[in-house]
Amino acid sequence: MNLLMVIFALIAILSVVSVFRSIKEKNILSLIFGVAAAAIFGWFVIMTVLNQGYPPKLH
């Protein structure tokens, strides 16, 4: 779960970058998908850190 959380955090960060790029290029569909991906993956990472801590508890 630890490595998966790091990968999801990287996806969330890249989604935020794509949101700013799509605003610059005025691409609405890319903006919608970027915001959705950043929200979903970011929420997963935040809730995993709050529930299990970092590094995660074993038991």
Image (cartoon, helix red, strand yellow):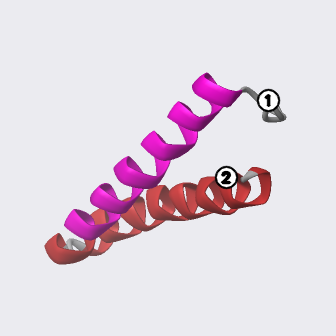
Residue under circle 1? 59
- Residue depicted at 59% across the width and 36% down the height: 48
> Where on the picture, by quarter, is residue 24?
bottom left
Residue 45 image offset from top left, x and y in percent: 56, 43
Residue range corresponding to the magenta coloring: 31-52
User: The residue tagged with tag 2: helix, strand or loop?
Assistant: helix
State the residue in front, 30 or 21.
Answer: 30
* Alpha-carbon span between mark 1 and mark 2: 18 Å
- Relative to 12, residue 27 above or below: below
Q: Residues within 10 Å of mark 2 (few under 14, many from 20)?
A: some
- Relative to 19, residue 27 above or below: below
State the residue in front, 17 or 54.
Answer: 54
Sooner in the amino-acid sequence: mark 1 or mark 2: 2
- Relative to 30, residue 54 above or below: above
> CB atoms at circles 1 and 2 under 8 Å apart?
no
User: The residue tagged with tag 1: helix, strand or loop?
Assistant: loop
Q: Does residue 33 show up magenta in the picture?
A: yes
Residue 40 image offset from top left, x and y in percent: 37, 52
Residue under circle 2? 5
- Residue depicted at 60% across the width and 23% down the height: 50
Residue 36 image offset from top left, x and y in percent: 28, 58
Tag 2: amino acid: Met
Tag 1: amino acid: His
- Relative placement, left or right, of 33 versus 8 is left
